[in-house]
Image: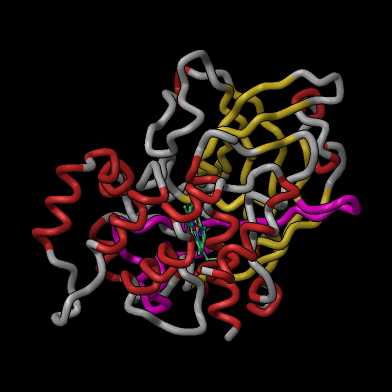
Amino acid sequence: MNRTRALLGGLAATGLLLTAAQAEEADPAAIVAGQFAAGGNHTGVRASGAKGVCLKGTFTPASGAAALSKAPHFAKAVPVTARFSMGGSNPKVSDKAKPVTRGFAMRMSEASGDMVFVTISAPVFSTKTPAQLLEFLQVRAPGPDGKPDAEKVKAFSAANPETTRQAGWLNARPVPASFAGVDYWAVHAYTLTNAKGDTKIARLKFVSADKAGLTDEEVKAKPDSFYAEELKERLARGPARFDLVAILAEAGDTTSDPTVAWPEDQRRTETLGTLAITGIEPDATCDARTFDPVVDLPEGIAGPADDPMFAIRSPAYAVSVSRRAN
Ligand code: HEM
């Protein structure tokens, strides 16, 4: 708990510090332990996104981006370090697994600081509070037979129906043919502020230029690990591109609950730029530190102050880094 307190203390300057009462209730260290347990307690890996590929690329802002945010990353092209991953702490998870999120973390670097987004291949997260996440993970911890207790999971889902939305969404869609062949959402509501001080609330989405899913037959024919090789071949032919799109909120859209999707097709959108993934980097480039989506944001873009799932990510990611480094 002391280590957790120290990590939380480091957040004080950001204004996103959890209150002591919330920290007690949430305990990021317990959540991270739950993430490791649910994935089989592997060591030396991330608590989530354990299996993945480190990448490099460039983010080029769209001409209209500066009208929405004064972040310098929206004023000129910047270099990017990124990582695609499979959700969960099991480094042996199959690339064919369902309903598992694919992850896309990225650090856009600029002299004044970084802009980090850590996104998933679904528009919603699985839980709305850290306490609910802890329980979600605990009921999924494998028993002596290596499997979670199906009755416990069923009872938890019945009592917490919003925790089934992400899996429902993923199960209704094909297995992505490539890490680069699916869209990724930041799921939280961000506030964009321009140089005049005008603000807009938006959820952010990275839209793949080359979306493709596998048929059931194609899935059967694939080995358990094919994404890394597919990516190598794809990038040898040219960059993998994603448009960063801001989905603008309307009155009534929740900013505090990432289990609730906004009706995207009824919302105005603005393209903020294009992320081109150009090559693969050694794992060490991504492993040295974490992608912290809470702390590493420049002026001109801020995470939601009222979404407890956002604030808890920073201390949880730090616990995971310290655990995998030891
Ligand atoms: C709410 C939306 C969330 C999204 C979109 C998300 C997505 C991701 C992704 C893509 C990764 C892999 C990062 C990489 O490749 O380095 C990751 C890692 C991780 N996530 Fe999340 N996550 C979310 C919420 C949370 C929450 C609420 C917690 C815990 C309270 C959490 C704990 C972690 C941890 C501990 C890691 C490993 C970090 C590391 O060792 O570097 N995540 N997450």
Task: Give residue 101's quadrant in the image.
Answer: bottom left
Above-or-below relation of 148 to 297: below
Residue visible at 90% across and 54% down in the picture = 111
Q: Quadrant of residue 34?
A: bottom left
Q: How is the image coloured?
A: secondary structure
Say which residue appears at 69% left-offset and 75% top-offset. 288
| Camera-side residue of 167 and 259 | 259
Kindly identify the residue that appears in the image at 55 percent across and 80 percent down: 324
Q: Nearer the viewer, residue 256 or 64?
A: 256
Membership of 33 in magenta stretch: no
Residue 138: horizontal and vertical position, in percent? Answer: 28, 63
Res 170 visible: yes
Q: Which span of residues is magenta-colored?
A: 85-114
The reply, left or right, for residue 140 in relation to residue 264 is left
Q: Who's the residue at 80% across and 38% down the image?
A: 299
Q: Residue furthest right?
A: 111
Q: How many marks?
A: 0
Q: Is residue 120 above or below residue 315?
A: above
Which quadrant is home to the C terminus? bottom right
Q: Is residue 233 visible?
A: no
Taking 84 as reference, is 134 left or right? left
Residue 140, position as x, y percentages in the image? 24, 64
The single residue placed furthest to the left in the displayed view is 151
Image coords of residue 192 (percent x, y): 70, 29
Residue 309 screen position, x and y as percent: 48, 46
